[in-house]
Image (cartoon, rainbow, N blue to C red):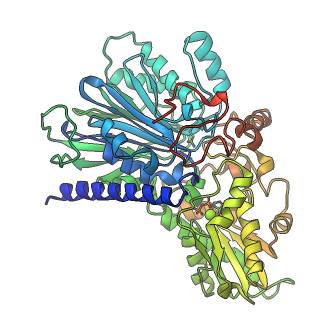
Amino acid sequence: MSTIECIRSAAIDIFKQFLLGKRRARDLNLHHHKELDMCGIIGLVLQDTNVAVSPELAEGLSLLQHRGQDACGIITCGPRGRLNQVKSNGMVRDVFDNQAISTLRGCMGIGHVRYPTAGSSAQAEAQPFYVNSPYGITFAHNGNLINTEELKEFLDQDAHRHINTDSDSEMLLNIFADNLQQTGKFRINEEDIFTAVRDLTRTCKGAYACVAMIAGFGIVAFRDPNGIRPLGYGVRAAGEPVDGMKSPQGDKQKTGLDYVFASESVVCDALGFTDWVDVKPGECMIVTRHSVSRRQVAEPATFAPDIFEYVYFARPDSVLDGISVYRSRMGMGDTLADGVRKQLLDKSLPDSSSVDVVIPVPDTSRVAALQLAQNLRIPYREGFVKNRYVGRTFIMPGQQQRRKNVRRKLNAMALEFSGKNVLLVDDSIVRGTTSKEIIQMARDAGAKNVFMASCAPAIRYSNVYGIDMPNRKELVAHGRTEEQVAEYIGADKVIFQTLDGLVKSCSSLNEDIQHFDCSVFTGKYITGGVDVAYLEHLENLRADNVKNKVTTEEAVSPACSGPMNGADDNIGLANQRR
Ligand SMILES: O=P(O)(O)OC[C@H]1O[C@H](OP(=O)(O)OP(=O)(O)O)[C@H](O)[C@@H]1O
Ligand SMILES: NC(=O)CC[C@H](N)C(=O)O
Ligand SMILES: [Mg+2]
């Protein structure tokens, strides 16, 4: 068996596991629980027209599931440029069963996993989006735009384009489509696309990493001028078709390379692609089955990836913009160890204390916590056991749901807590939901003193670039000192990472990147254009109680694959049943 065949047959096996997982989840009645956050995008162009792209797209989306749990979708381009779409609220394994995958014909496609940062969780806002004119364009976006009011007015009054949802991504697609429309051409070429993306970077403000597919043409990938959200690509020698993955069209075997675009490099590794390269900030890349071209289209700007990708969002086995997420978290453990030494263990401090054990808050903080424990020569113990069927709680839509799920997710083992001075380590303290619950759990399990260390500095400002932290008032450290945060979450002391320490743990791994968007810690937004009035506007739009208006926990079951029975606002152009 060739390497390619091995990889493809492994992909099929993994899919079988998915389906098994799906049945198990249903048996356990757990399929209605939602997990992670952010959005993830993927695009795939295969050379061999006999091979269906959909199994690998679905597999790729499952590898990005930690970036978005509300909805997912795939659109493929099949024979004669015909587009096929499956998208729905729910987890990848629930939405993409064998039946769904078999309807997605074609050797080119894009996909998306969604965690909403604009609009609501409504099924109609699931991505990819599609516009028929011009040329048939589909679109998947990770990020968030900050000038949507302006864009809405332009699209309505000047471009005469109807926007059917509150999603900023639908606007972004329509700006791209309108730019292409301006060519007035029957058929476009690469030059027209570069110009359209260049113009888009001049009109759209905020964060955007995107893949677009133009029917019968190819895939276009681009990143905002500051490179806030990640995107890269890998290549693979085109392989032989494998039984069970054939699409019924075409029989020509092309030689050359398959291309995958993805938010994170883990997709490239796991699907058997190699030579991962990041799309540069402000760069646009076009891949067809016959050609590849790339160009810097935006005016030069400060390259400033969002540092929260390294703190929390990305998988540790991904390398983003040349920085290993795993190594950066090790670095965060090292620098945080210095802070713990100075603020807690130093014997000259009036309130110094000894620590018997370091315990991570699963999952994300594990890498840093182990490093910190080794550095301080304190035993590291897994005091909390995680229920593997409950995912990330941070991005769940309501505070009540988030709180309930911390208890469902983590269980304290009394033997690691009883009578001990415990140092808990988490990657971040955002709303304080997790810390408050687990500190109480540690005390209930008999801990003497409970200290809390955070790999990120105190988060006091909104995120406007694709992480759903729009409301300063929801942030536990907003308007509170460190002592007040400790009091609120019930810790004997809380130790935050310094901003310098955090930046150093990332920048030391790639000397080409010396700036990061750290706005949630500093209130300084890399794109500009974010002022108090804008933040207040955003807070009104995105407050928990407002965004749940159409997505109450009863109306929208988080990882549920079934239809939604929510308010009328939920009913859009989405298919209501699968
Ligand atoms: O202060 P909070 O508002 O609770 O947010 C911070 C917590 O949320 C995240 O965990 P999550 O459960 O989402 O994911 P994980 O399993 O990857 O750690 C993060 O790792 C922190 O533990
Ligand atoms: N987290 C994201 O990247 C969200 C993308 C887009 N703003 C949406 O709400 O669908
Ligand atoms: Mg966590």
86 relative to 270, above or below? above
**Of the pair 444 and 348, the residue shown nearer to us:** 444
- Quarter of image, ligand 3: bottom right
- Residue drawn at 85 percent across, 68 percent down: 487
| Snapshot quadrant of residue 359 | bottom right
Left or right: residue 562 compared with residue 145 = left
Q: Is residue 242 above or below residue 509?
A: above
Splitting the image into 4 quarters, where does residue 105 fall? Answer: top left
Q: Is residue 288 left or right of residue 233?
A: left
Is there any visible trace of residue 162 in the rendered image?
yes
Residue 218: x and y in percent read: 31, 30
Residue closest to the eye, 326 or 121: 121
Q: Residue at x 68, y 46 (%)?
A: 553
> Residue 45: where, in percent of width, then height?
29, 39
**Residue 264 visible in the snapshot:** no
Number of numbered discs on residues: 0
Tell me where residue 305 appears, x and y as whole percent.
55, 48
Lateral position of residue 45 relative to residue 488, left or right = left
Please provide percent x and percent y for residue 382. 59, 79
Tell me the quadrant of the picture where the C terminus can be found. Answer: top left
Foreground residue among 109 and 397:
397
Q: Is residue 335 above or below residue 108?
A: below
- What residue sits 56% from the left and 77% below the top? 371
